Image (cartoon, rainbow, N blue to C red):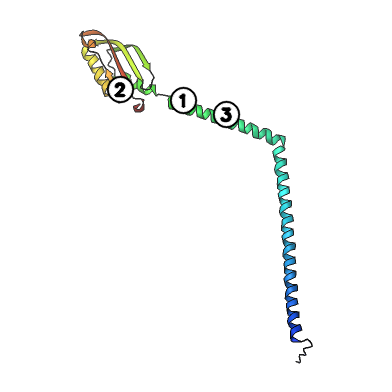
């Protein structure tokens, strides 16, 4: 094979530079066209999504359903908060009365009971006892209950041996109920 160089070395070098320049120019043009296409697609997609969201948000049935749902959720939240507050404020009095009745001998009768629910709940009991020993048994049984604190049992309760009208006061530890 025979190669004939008709161009001088300097012109060949200029020709090589020109080819590289044209190829670089073509690559940059293609990159710019591709970037423009991506920008157009992105803008179109954004426009489509915005229109879809606006259509969805302005649909009357969607707004009505959403409002109804929000009202139902708010109502449920209020009810839950009320129930939570009531549950925290509630004292399990049934447990108190069960233990109190179990501690009471048959000859003891309660004629009056006052319960004050304050920061420290208190109760006052008044009643009648057949004998002094029954009343002392009842007092001892009350002292054994874990939720009874500061039991006040006046000595005047023990003055008569039979048919005693008695009264006692105590605090209630509601956390032990």
Residue 3 placement: quadrant: bottom right
Mark 3 or mark 1: which comes first in sequence?
3
Within-10-Å neighbours for mark 2: few <14, some 14–19, many 20+? many
Within-10-Å neighbours for mark 3: few <14, some 14–19, many 20+? few
Q: Residue at x 29, y 12 (%)?
A: 167
Camera-nearest residue between 118 and 156: 118
Q: Residue at x 30, y 16 (%)?
A: 169
CA–CA distance in space, label 3 to label 2: 40 Å
Residue under numbered circle 2: 148
Q: Residue at x 73, y 48 (%)?
A: 47
What kind of element bears circle 3? helix
- Would you place residue 59 above or below residue 124 in this image? below
Determine whether, in the image, residue 12 is placed left or right of residue 114: right
* Quadrant in the picture for the C terminus: top left
Question: Residue 84 at what x, y percent from top left?
Answer: 47, 29
Residue under numbered circle 1: 86
Determine whether, in the image, residue 78 is placed left or right of residue 97: right
Mark 1 or mark 2: which comes first in sequence?
1
- Would you place residue 1 above or below residue 75 in this image? below
Residue under numbered circle 3: 75
Residue 161 placement: quadrant: top left
CA–CA distance in space, label 1 to label 2: 24 Å
């Amino acid at each position: 094979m025979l190669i004939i160089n008709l161009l001088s070395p300097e012109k060949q070098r200029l020709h090589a530079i020109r080819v590289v320049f044209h190829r670089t120019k073509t690559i940059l043009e293609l990159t710019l066209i591709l970037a423009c296409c991506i920008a157009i697609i992105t803008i179109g997609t954004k426009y489509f999504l915005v229109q879809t969201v606006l259509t969805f948000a302005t649909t009357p049935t969607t707004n009505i359903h959403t409002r109804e749902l929000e009202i139902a959720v708010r109502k449920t939240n209020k009810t839950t908060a009320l129930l939570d507050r009531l549950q925290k404020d509630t004292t399990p009095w049934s447990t108190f009365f069960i233990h109190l009745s179990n501690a009471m001998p048959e000859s003891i009768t309660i004629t009056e009971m006052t319960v004050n629910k304050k920061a420290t709940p208190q109760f006052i009991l008044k009643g009648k006892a057949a004998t002094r020993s029954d009343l002392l048994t009842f007092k001892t049984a009350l002292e054994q209950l874990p939720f009874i604190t500061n039991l006040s049992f006046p000595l005047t309760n023990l003055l008569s041996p039979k048919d005693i009208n008695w009264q006692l006061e105590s605090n209630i530890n509601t956390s032990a109920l």
